[in-house]
Image (cartoon, rainbow, N blue to C red):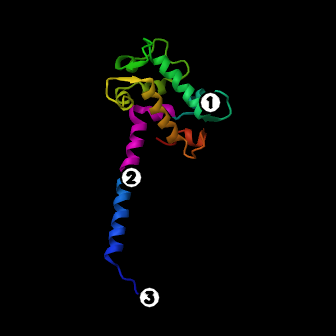
Amino acid sequence: MTRTITATSLTTAAAVIAALLFISPAMAEDMASFATGGYAKGLQTMAMMHMIDTNKDGMVSADEWTAFQERSFAALDKDHSGFLEHSEFTSAPKDGLAFATAAYVHGLMSDAMFKKIDTDGDGKISKEEFLSYQHRIFEMLDKSGKGMVGATDFIRRGG
């Protein structure tokens, strides 16, 4: 049996290859956003998973994740304005965040993370921007899409 390569099949193959080339950078950009400022390294630890897992079932639910992020926002919003100004976000609270590890706080409270979370570029982070960003992080961790993240997906492996 002889196969003939037609212009149509070449065009189709070229389109598939081009699509794959465009998908890969988008995925890499998401992971780069996630890891900015050491945030991923500080977040994806067993200690942080235990702090977020309030019912201690070994899983972090979407509700537990959101509650943790709401507590984080409230602790960072030192002037209770409903926004995180750059100086609030990048300076550690005097009493720290008792419900988070130092590595997580250090990774989160960076200039680079401020720029990533301040999606409208107005120089402050609204609660909506903060929670929306954190929701995307949860979705990246929740590889199964079940609204629950176990240690296998939560804990960072390697370097």
Residue drawn 60% across and 43% down?
146
* The label number, if any, that marks residue 1 in the structure image: 3
Residue drawn 51% across and 18% down?
97
Q: Is residue 1 magenta?
A: no
Residue tagged 2: 24
* First of labels 1, 2 by sequence position: 2
Q: Quadrant of residue 120?
A: top left
Residue tagged 1: 53
Task: Please tell me how crowded label 3 is: few (under 14), some (14-19), or many (20+) other residues with Cα within 10 Å.
Answer: few
* First of labels 2, 3 by sequence position: 3
* Amino acid identity at mark 3: Met
Please tell me whether mark 1 sits on a helix, a strand or a loop.
loop
- Residue 49 percent location from the top left of the image: 58, 32
Q: Which residues are magenta?
A: 25-43
Tell me whether the residue at label 1 lies in contact with that at label 2, contact meaning CB atoms closer than 8 angstroms: no
Confirm whether residue 29 shows in the render.
Answer: yes
- Residue 52 percent location from the top left of the image: 58, 28
Q: State the separation of the CA atoms marked 2 and 3.
A: 36 Å
Choose between 125 and 60: the one closer to the eye: 125
Q: State the separation of the CA atoms marked 1 and 2.
A: 32 Å
Q: Is residue 91 left or right of residue 50?
A: left
Q: Quadrant of residue 153?
A: top right
Which of the two discs, 3 and 1, sits closer to the camera?
A: 3
Choose between 24 and 48: the one closer to the eye: 24
* Amino acid identity at mark 1: Asp
Q: Eyeballing the image, is 118 above or below 3? A: above
- Residue 98 percent location from the top left of the image: 54, 18
* First of labels 3, 1 by sequence position: 3
Q: State the separation of the CA atoms marked 3 and 1.
A: 61 Å
Q: Eyeballing the image, is 81 above or below 54? A: above
- Residue 37 percent location from the top left of the image: 39, 31
